Image: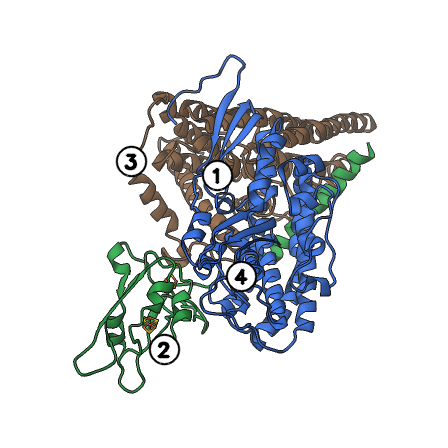
Amino acid sequence: MTVPIQCTPDETFVLNLGPQHPATHGVLRVKLTMDGEYVVKAEPVLGYIHRMHEKMAESGTFAQFMPNTPRMDYLSALSYNQGYVMAVERAAGIEVPERAEYIRTITVELNRISSHLLWFGAFVLDLGGFTPLLYAFDDREKILDLLERITGSRLTYCYYRFGGVYNDIDDEFIAGTREFIKRLRSRLPSMYHDLVTGNIILIKRLRDIGFVTQETCRKYGATGPVLRGSGVQYDVRKNEPYSVYPELDFDIPCYPEGDSMARYMVRMDEITQSLRIIEQALDKLPEGPVNAKVPKVLKPGAGDCYCAVEAARGTFGCRLVCDGGKNPYRLKLRSPTFSNLSLFGEVAEGMILADALAFMGSLDLVIPCIDR
Amino acid sequence: MSDYWSDVINGTRSLVIGMNITVRELFKPVITEQYPHFVPVMTPRFRGHIELIGNEETGLPNCVVCGMCQRACPSSCITVAGEKPEGSKKKVLTKYILDFTKCSLCGSCVESCNFNAIKFSHDYNLASTRKEDYIFDLVKRLEEQS
Amino acid sequence: MDTSIWEPIIYLVGIMAFAGLNAAYLGWCERKGAGHIQRRIGPKEVGWFGLLQPLADGIKLMSKQLLVPQGVDGILFRAAPILAMVPAITSMVAIPFSETIQARSIDLSVLLIFALASIGMMAVLIGGWASGNKYAIISATRSVSQNIAYEIPMLVTVITIVMLSGSMNLEEIAMKQEGGFWNWNIFPVAGESIAQAIIMPISFIIFFICSVAETNRAPFDMAEAESELIAGFMTEYGSMGFGLFMMGEYLNIVVGACLTTILFLGGWYGPFGFTSSVFWFLLKIYILIATFIWIRWTFPRTQIYKLLNLSWKILIPFSLAILLLTAVFLKVEGFLI
Ligand code: SF4
Ligand code: SF4
């Protein structure tokens, strides 16, 4: 900007954060009204990467929308894939074979870990620490390799199919996953908790900063780690169980403090829980087919159904309205990040700039997921 | 006051622990792959852009120009055309254009093909500065391969 | 020492070469160090082990257009990068690299260096202000408050040293520490009193933290804070303007390391007393610089108010207490002897 700074009589000025800014990790724009270093008002401006996914769904067949789902939240692509697939299966009344459900659970949890690892790195990067990002990427790389082996892609997986999965997993994948579980378990205490979680600078920057109360969460519909960091033990995997989650034993990490540290801890604990889930699912993995018989052209009967999954960032919901044709009549996608971002404006008021950005990082925003 | 002292002491300790970890990493071997010098091998299921499969004996494309892939593609990047030579019942593929600028590597085309005529290639060194480089003529590609 | 015309010229050339080499190659060291800490390689393509990378970067920066955005204060905008470089080089005049290698022995050299360091901070302020960019201005104000907060404990610890050595001349301060490491100011076991030996390491740590903060290095790089303020005061700078800021930053690190070496680590004296040469001096400053790099790539950044709290609530009380104790010890010794 070339215009000299002009202060309004009350000595505030507007700082345009984004759409290109290192801390927003994408094309999010936040209009900040600042009083010196303090944020007086924060107003997220959306729409820079809107791609009309919902409209695209209406103009193609059910299967043709599938590759769009991972493009919403590219970091936990499989959860979105699963949400959509489950909605269509519910509408068309397709039974999924058990082995496929287990494979879905294993892969989606691996994806959740990789998403949390990336968030961890990016979050510490927001706080100015560069090195943990690379250590997290080292582990994440192993997950990407594993998933690439079976899905064929590294980021925007499109692995699930109506009534099953694209193809079966092999022994090498199972062995690799077990090895990965061991590796991450041994690295979590030192490379993550000693280096970052216990660090006094990090603690001072996260503790007691960015309080999100349960009321705020309710008001804006925040879900996922943001909600659990405010002390609400809500997780779709437990509260409205789907897939094979009821058969697996895991905990929902929940911290009542509601500050940035609580959200940080929720995610770190979720990594541990996901490892547990994967381990059990691998042990219980049944033999059998991975695909149900599904007609090539899917025509679910007219109706209306909703299906929610717990993505890495919160509840991803799919509402599917069918009119009996080959295309969805209406597909409403509820993305968790949109709701989580909405509370930013209210909570960030009165924070100083550095804390506001740390708070934004702790919400774990993925911009394409906000602007579907 | 005790908070103050525990902050000072624990804080210092945490900083020392952190520095200890990074200095140990400093002497560990490098883990990155030196890409242009060491080229990674793609896994069998790697989804590159699609390519045609030739018949094992004749080397001609397996494709029967049914057009399923063209219809299945969500981004309409495929253009197939064929003609019926006189006297033969089957169509022969004459044109198979993939507009890779729009392709999302979703694989719908491969799944929709009932004749084992297309597969994913393992090419990934596809960077270019010109858009035209991404309009692939797959028939020509198949001819060059055989 | 002969006072021919050649002496100043040789020193001028020598200091410029030393400064230039350091400014260029510390960047390379930092990138290599950061790379290996993160288990990457760092620069490797240009020249052997990427050793020509600084040259390539320099050529790239110089060949770029010197862009002066509209609406900036032209003179100050252009002056700031130079102002960042010059004080750092000038301070090297007063630094004794060994008994014989020193451009000018100035009686108040400690004071001179601190005065010049404050001018370096002015460069950040001017650069930030003249850019007319909101991020740059926030960065400039931050760096001023940070520098004021950290100069106090730094100077208080320096006063402690000055009291111990009875001189404000860096050369004399260093000469006072002649002999093995037990004579150095950081750990003066053979010095005035045993009690002094216990408090001086704390004073060294305070000084070190302050010099990290003074040189705007992570975890105290409030002024640059790339994830908050893009590039802080350098946001609007491109080409060599940016290059000069970077070089100034590295030179400030060198000066900070030199100062720490002379004040606390026995200057050019070897650790066991029998050798003394410029080699030891350089070894010590590069170990210190490596520590700077190591710290930077380990920790997250602090937040500006936490940073000020650290100075006002921890460093200043501690350094004042050390100053007081030192004064008491010196007086008590005086009585005993
Ligand atoms: S991979 Fe998908 S987008 Fe690409 S050509 Fe095939 S169907 Fe079309
Ligand atoms: S679906 Fe297969 S056979 Fe049919 S046109 Fe496409 S490639 Fe050819």
Q: Chain of mark 1?
A: A
For disc 2, does the CB lie below 8 Å from ligand 2? yes
Mark sitting on residue B115: 2
Between the residue at mark 4 and the residue at mark 1, the CA separation in whole angstroms equals 26 Å
Q: Is residue A240 above or below residue C237?
A: below
Kind of residue sitting beneath label 1? Leu
Q: Residues within 10 Å of mark 1 (few under 14, many from 20)?
A: many
Q: Which chain is brown?
A: C
Secondary element at tag 1? loop
* Residue under numbered circle 3: C65
Q: Is residue A295 above or below residue A88?
A: below
The image shows a total of numbered marks equal to 4
Side (left or right) of B55 relative to B25? left
- The answer to whether any part of residue C184 appears in the image is no
* Residue under numbered circle 4: A141
State which quadrant residue B99 falls in.
Answer: bottom left
Kind of residue sitting beneath label 3? Gln
Q: Chain of mark 2?
A: B
Kind of residue sitting beneath label 2? Phe
Front label number (2 vs 4): 2
x then y, percent, for residue C20 = 40, 40
